[in-house]
Image (tube, grey):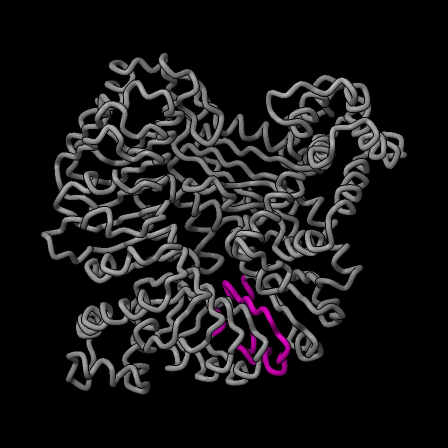
């Protein structure tokens, strides 16, 4: 599969090929994938490739989720009808899914192409009988050794003479299968490079290479058996996620902690320990890295190969550790003997009614027929994640009886309120209510001392007064709320109404503007109480039209643990929209994102003095001025990533020579008034990647001509790159 994927990526990203198409889409197909889901995925990719998220039919990416099957099919056809498109359908399993998509994708426009990869040669032949499929072959000995060596030994290290011959024999035992080579290399990379240690592994590989793929399973068994017991449980848990899904590491880490898999260590949090364990699984090549964070280089999202996931599902079921039920396993889903269950798309009501012993219930885009009644009786749950269950409109009051609950994931559900009984969940660690219309929390919510990660909207935040210190709370994300007609009913029927009345609103009928203005008056006081009682915060994100900057920066120096600060909204500051002195920022801040802050004074003179800042993003109207200057030769000592996105008024940017000595990645998007790159950065020896997007053609020409960049091929993820003569390791992506 790795070879198919790499080959398809090269075709998809080839600049000469891309010049012939108007739009592109890469979609991953799984065994259980439905045509409607695939059509939606293609539409999302095409729409996001456009400058605006509007289609010719006026739809949006967000509105796509609410469309019916026939509307999606017609919408996709209309979207691509007048375009020359390239669509890659990766890993197609069945004839049916291809035939269904073939009827939807328009074929009247000459020049469009569909690239299909599959493990089944008959599927490829059925798709286009007149075209001979391109079949990939196994790696030869030379290619096998190159791949194995890259995974088994550190970069730029010679292979120790003691194990050289044995290492080549081990590579040959993999039968030319890339996955087997990668996994065996990952296994050996964690072992001593001594002959006796490697010989022990070789002796355990007592099979003859047959080329039928069974080597992968045997090596996977070796790798799995080498794991410690805690790592085995963490690996098997990943099998709960749907096939081919991209998994958020922050969510996975929170789940592992809630499950009790992670041991508490003295010098770091359980979340940090969990990430260390995840890094070991990456090193062993048992999971694949999809994306790394730019601030610290940590793994941000992962995926797992189908073969490894299938192995994990079977092992988890055999050990009665986890039961995974897809929509096609409905009969078996009613017989759950393990303490953990994961349901994909659908679930039978009796599956939970007959399983009161469940400790974990994971739902992935569940389609529910009886609301939240299936939760009744599950009083032993520690983890409940129902993300994407849009049909879930109400939780039963009995949820307060789940006194062991540590993780409550309600993201993207149809919920509008929580029962007051959640105040009894005194072991709760995570509440994730993002992208919901939950506007109210019970008064005693903040008395829960075990809270570690809270994601709520503005109304829910100000509905409950902050009480007690929260020494465990690491993540607080407060997002803006969408107006819903039910909001007024909720405010009228809850104590929140009283708080609004005391803060200006006097009319019995609340309007949208009145609610917004009341929130703006109440938020500073609530935020101050939070910052006063939550000095263990690691990540703080505020998304609201007006952010009380003076309150925030008054307490920021005391937030010694805060690493990440994200502010979406206008900063209310006393000094005419000017950032306070750098001493008013969290002392250990490594990531700062400002979006629509509407700063009138140049922020760089302050931000360049933040000693540990590694990632800085200035987006939207974060800065309204025309010129920006990094005037200190010692400025931004650790900054590695800088992104300027839609800073519309910026015309001139100056950087003193020697500033930003650690900068490796610079991104400039849609800053159309900017005339040229700063001279202080043009000959940087650390800059490895310069990404330019939605800039005037004159800007690109100046970069190429004045900074002497030459265009070269850059495989992924962008088709065009510019490499500097002064620094051959640097590239510019446009």
The residue located at (24%, 49%) in the rendering is 583
**Residue 568, how many percent across, how many down?**
28, 54
Task: Give the side of residue 92 with respect to residue 692, left or right.
Answer: right
> Does residue 207 appear in this view?
yes
| Residue lying at the far left of the rendered structure | 576
* Nearer to me, 556 or 454: 556
Examine the rendered structure and indicate whether residue 278 appears above or below residue 677: below
Q: Can residue 546 be seen at all in this image of the molecule? A: no
Note whether 552 is above or below 301 in the view shown.
below
Magenta stretch in the rendered image? 365-392
Q: Is residue 484 left or right of residue 348?
A: left
Give percent across and percent down for residue 93. 67, 44
Residue 137 on image: x %, y %: 72, 24
**Which image quarter: residue 242?**
bottom right
In this picture, residue 509 sits left or right of residue 197:
left
* Above/below status of 563 relative to 653: below
Residue 366 lies within the magenta run: yes
Which quarter of the rendered picture does the N terminus lie within? top right
* Residue that appears at 48% across and 36% down: 107
Q: Residue, x 59% and y 38% (percent of image)?
A: 90
Report the side of 298 relative to 306 (left or right).
left
Residue nearer the viewer, 174 or 25? 174
How far from the left and from the top, in percent, is residue 510?
20, 79
Please tell me whether residue 622 belongs to the stretch shown in magenta: no
Most prominent secondary structure in the magenta stretch?
loop
Give the total number of marks visible in the rendering. Answer: 0
Of the 4 image quadrants, the one containing the C terminus is: top left
Q: Determine the residue positioned at 22% across, 35% down.
A: 671
């Amino acid at each position: 599969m790795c070879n198919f994927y790499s080959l398809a990526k090269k075709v998809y990203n080839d600049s000469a090929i891309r010049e012939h198409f108007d739009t592109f889409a890469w979609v991953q197909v799984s065994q259980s994938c439905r045509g409607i889901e695939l059509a939606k995925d293609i539409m999302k990719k095409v729409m996001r490739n456009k400058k605006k998220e509007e289609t010719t039919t006026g739809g949006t990416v967000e509105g796509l989720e609410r469309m019916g099957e026939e509307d999606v099919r017609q919408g996709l056809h209309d979207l691509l009808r007048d375009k020359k498109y390239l669509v890659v359908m990766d890993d197609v399993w069945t004839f049916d899914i291809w035939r269904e998509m073939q009827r939807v994708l328009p074929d009247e426009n000459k020049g469009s192409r569909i690239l299909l990869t599959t493990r089944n040669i008959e599927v490829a032949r059925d798709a286009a009988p007149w075209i001979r499929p391109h079949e990939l072959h196994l790696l030869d000995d030379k290619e096998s050794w190159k791949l194995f060596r890259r995974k088994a030994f550190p970069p730029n290290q010679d292979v120790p003479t003691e194990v050289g011959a044995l290492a080549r024999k081990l590579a040959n035992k993999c039968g030319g299968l890339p996955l087997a080579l990668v996994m065996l290399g990952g296994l050996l990379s964690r072992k001593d490079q001594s002959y006796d240690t490697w010989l022990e592994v070789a002796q355990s590989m007592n099979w003859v290479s047959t080329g039928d793929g069974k080597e992968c399973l045997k090596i996977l068994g070796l790798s799995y058996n080498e794991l410690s017991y805690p790592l085995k449980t963490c690996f098997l848990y990943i099998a709960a996620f749907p096939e081919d899904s991209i998994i958020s590491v922050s969510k996975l880490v929170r789940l592992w902690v809630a499950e009790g898999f992670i041991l508490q260590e003295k010098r770091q949090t359980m979340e940090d320990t969990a990430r260390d364990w995840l890094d070991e699984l990456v090193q062993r090549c048992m999971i694949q890295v999809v994306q790394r964070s730019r601030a610290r280089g940590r793994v941000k999202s992962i995926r797992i190969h189908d073969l490894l996931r299938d192995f994990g599902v079977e092992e988890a079921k055999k050990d009665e550790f986890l039961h995974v039920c897809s929509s096609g396993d409905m009969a078996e889903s009613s017989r759950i003997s393990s303490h953990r269950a994961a349901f994909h798309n659908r679930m039978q009501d009796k599956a939970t009614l007959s399983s009161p012993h469940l400790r974990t219930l994971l739902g992935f885009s569940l389609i529910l027929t009886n609301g939240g009644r299936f939760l009744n009786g599950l009083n032993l749950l520690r983890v409940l994640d129902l993300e994407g269950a849009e049909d879930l409109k109400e939780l039963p009051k009995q949820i307060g009886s789940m006194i062991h609950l540590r993780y409550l994931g309600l993201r993207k559900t149809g919920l509008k309120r929580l029962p007051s009984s959640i105040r009894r969940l005194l072991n709760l660690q995570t509440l994730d209510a993002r992208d919901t219309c939950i506007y109210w929390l019970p008064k005693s919510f903040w008395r829960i001392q075990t809270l570690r990660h809270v994601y709520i909207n503005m109304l829910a935040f100000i509905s409950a007064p902050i009480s007690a210190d929260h020494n465990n709370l690491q993540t607080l994300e407060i997002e803006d709320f969408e107006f819903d007609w039910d909001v007024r009913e909720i405010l009228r029927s809850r104590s929140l109404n009283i708080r609004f009345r005391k803060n200006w609103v006097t009319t019995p009928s609340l309007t949208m503007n009145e609610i917004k203005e009341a929130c703006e008056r109440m938020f500073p006081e609530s935020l101050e109480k939070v910052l006063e009682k939550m000095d263990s915060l690691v990540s703080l994100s505020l998304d609201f039209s007006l952010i009380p900057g003076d309150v925030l920066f008054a307490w920021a120096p005391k937030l010694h643990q805060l690493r990440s600060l994200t502010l979406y909204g206008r900063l209310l500051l006393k000094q005419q929209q000017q950032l306070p002195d750098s001493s008013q920022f969290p002392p250990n801040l490594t990531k700062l994102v400002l979006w629509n802050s509407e700063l009138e004074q140049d922020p760089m003179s302050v931000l360049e003095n933040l000693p540990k800042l590694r990632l800085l993003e200035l987006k939207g109207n974060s800065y309204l001025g025309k010129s920006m200057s990094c005037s200190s030769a010692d400025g931004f000592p650790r900054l590695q990533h800088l992104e300027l996105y839609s800073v519309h008024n910026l015309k001139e940017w100056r950087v003193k020579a020697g500033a930003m000595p650690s900068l490796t990645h610079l991104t400039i998007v849609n800053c159309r008034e900017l005339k040229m790159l700063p001279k202080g950065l043009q000959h940087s020896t650390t800059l490895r990647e310069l990404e330019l997007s939605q800039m005037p053609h004159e800007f690109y020409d100046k970069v190429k001509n004045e900074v002497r960049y030459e265009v070269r091929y850059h495989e992924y993820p962008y088709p065009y790159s510019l490499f500097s003569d002064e620094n051959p390791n640097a590239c510019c992506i446009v």
